[in-house]
Amino acid sequence: MHRLATLGFSISVGVSAVALTSGCQPSTTVARTVGPAEPAQRAAVSFVHCVEQDGGGCVTRDPLHVSWDAFALLNWLGAGSPTSILLGLRREVEHHSDRLAVQDRLVSVAARYREPLRGAECKPESATPLTELLPRVVARVQARMQSLGLWRPDFEELVASLAGEATAGLDGGWLVHMTCYGDPYELWLATAKRDERQVVVGILSSLPAYLGGEPLSDDFVEGRIRARSSGSSVNIGVVREGAVDSRWMPFSIEEL
Amino acid sequence: MFTPTLLLASFLLATTVTDGDGELQRGLPAAPSITDLIRAQATPEVLQGFETVLLTQVNAIFGSENLPVANGGPVEPGVYVTVSPQQLLVFDSKISDMQGGLVPPGPVSRECKSGCKAALWSAFRQVWLRALDEAHSLGLEVPARVLFAAEASVPAKTLIELAYAAAETRPGDPPGFALLVNGSNSGLRSRGFYLLPPGGIRVSPGDNVLALRVSLGAGESFVVSAAHPRFAPQVEGSGWKLLAAELAKVKKRYPNKVAVIIDVGDDATVGDVVMVMVAAQKHFPSTVLTAGLPVKWG
């Protein structure tokens, strides 16, 4: 099981020396120590607040983005649809090699989250060290590609290379789980350690089951689909004209 | 250490082969290479590796020799659904156990006009949401095709229930449908089909619609009828060769018609549906599937 660092402060209670002499009141002090995930969670909260205001403007150039992109690419191989993997692998690997493109994608993702995050009141729930997740991602990719019939030595080298990049930049980073009252309902912000500070380097909209993610409730699924379908530039239509039924039976009525 | 880009240039894919006896080879070849993927993605109508992925899964779940055997067209990429008498998968994720090829009983979804079960509705909505997310993040299109790899013995009404569930849950318009078949030496092939709209359709006399229908019963029994009131008498029979002969007679009277509605009833299997497709393919190559929905005249 992976370790989850719960929200909030670890609280340690220390009892000061108690004076037994009469006239002195015993005093108790509460020392609040910062849990290991706290800096990452604070960074995530700050980033979300920034995105609400400035969208993609919150993303600063950082070589650590490439490390997260390697992690995200592996996660996609472990959880994405096989069809999209076959369709998009080439472009995604090429994209990964372009640092500016990697950064641009994070900028566009942050820009897309700007409106939904306003009023969504997202708050951190838990955080998991990325170093704990990465081996599971790699193992998942290997097992999955084998079951899909796509695993080959060169694929193995590709995965090892990506894992190496992820390890190099994400040691000390966390995946912070945030829950929200509205769309996006849940999101996961990845942080990395830079100059002893936690900085956000990536965003996931869902966590696959093999990493402990739970399926969204039906209401959340509907909310997300509504949000993604309205004003979307994604091509989801199937154009069929002059048909018996333009949606279901797209052939000429004379043929029926 | 190789860079991912260099590795991409060396990644290769293998082809699908058959053993010459109509059974697609079980022991799949080495996986596709990245070079083939590059080539394939430059010609998107053929997605290299897709057949390998499909065959690997079919062989793992029920064996490609248990697909309906027929000729067909090329396999084009899309969402793929695998159905055996025991389980149901979308892509490589198990959605549900099956009970003798039937979706387990459960409440009907209020949103599903075709009356599909709530469990199917939820599962397919999740699938389409992930497809939307991938389309947004990767710049891909949401798949416009759903392929069904169904063991031949699976009840045909299951195929229809799944197809409606997949279609009604898709944001935007329903997708196209294809049924995967074992093309023997041709490898994995597909047969396209349509569904009657939920609730059926009504046609006016002025549309000059025939709406030829083959209703299936137990075994190879069939009834040929049509929505047009002057189509008479309806023909009953048994056996796919007889069906092909009867359809040839119908074609002589209605040469402009190319579509046949296959009403699967309770007893027909996916294999039976494919046999009807084969019997009709020469004269009525467009197939519309239904489980009892009407084409109303007038």
Image (tube, rainbow, N blue to C red):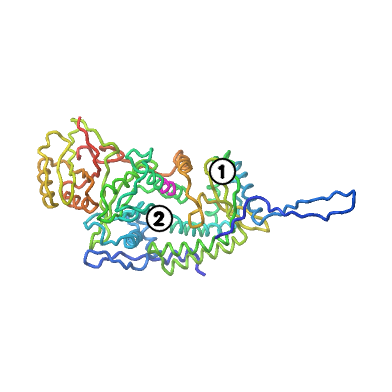
Residue at horizontal 9 percent and vertical 45 percent from the top? B249
Measured from the top left, where is residue A185 in percent x and y?
Answer: 53, 44
For label 1, count other residues whose C-alpha is less than 10 Å away and answer few (under 14), some (14-19) or many (20+): some
For label 2, count other residues whose C-alpha is less than 10 Å away and answer few (under 14), some (14-19) or many (20+): few
In the rendered image, which quarter contains the C terminus of chain B?
A: top left
Chain where mark 2 sits: B
**Along the horizontal axis of the image, is A78 left or right of B271?**
right
With respect to residue B256, does B59 lie above or below? below
For the residue pair B244 and A25, the one nearer the viewer reads as: A25
Measured from the top left, where is residue B167 in percent x and y?
Answer: 34, 44
The magenta-colored residue range is: B125-130
Label 1: state its secondary structure.
loop
Residue at horizontal 46 percent and vertical 67 percent from the top? A156
Residue that mark 1 sits on: A180
Q: How far, Cα to Cα, is label 2 from label 1?
A: 27 Å
Q: Amino acid at mark 2?
A: Ser
Residue at horizontal 43 percent and vertical 44 percent from the top? A234
Which residue is situated farthest in the right direction here? A22
Image quarter of residue B271: bottom left
Label 2: state its secondary structure.
strand
Any mark on residue B158, and which? Answer: none
Measured from the top left, where is residue B16 in percent x and y?
Answer: 30, 64
**Along the horizontal axis of the image, is A245 left or right of A189?**
left
Q: What kind of secondary structure does the magenta stretch mostly adopt?
A: helix
Residue that mark 2 sits on: B93
Residue at horizontal 53 percent and vertical 57 percent from the top? A69
**Along the horizontal axis of the image, is B18 left or right of A90?**
left
**Along the horizontal axis of the image, is A27 left or right of B81?**
right
Measured from the top left, where is residue B5 in percent x and y?
Answer: 47, 63
With respect to residue B19, does A107 lie above or below? above
Q: Is residue A111 magenta?
A: no
For the residue pair B181 and A213, the one nearer the viewer reads as: A213
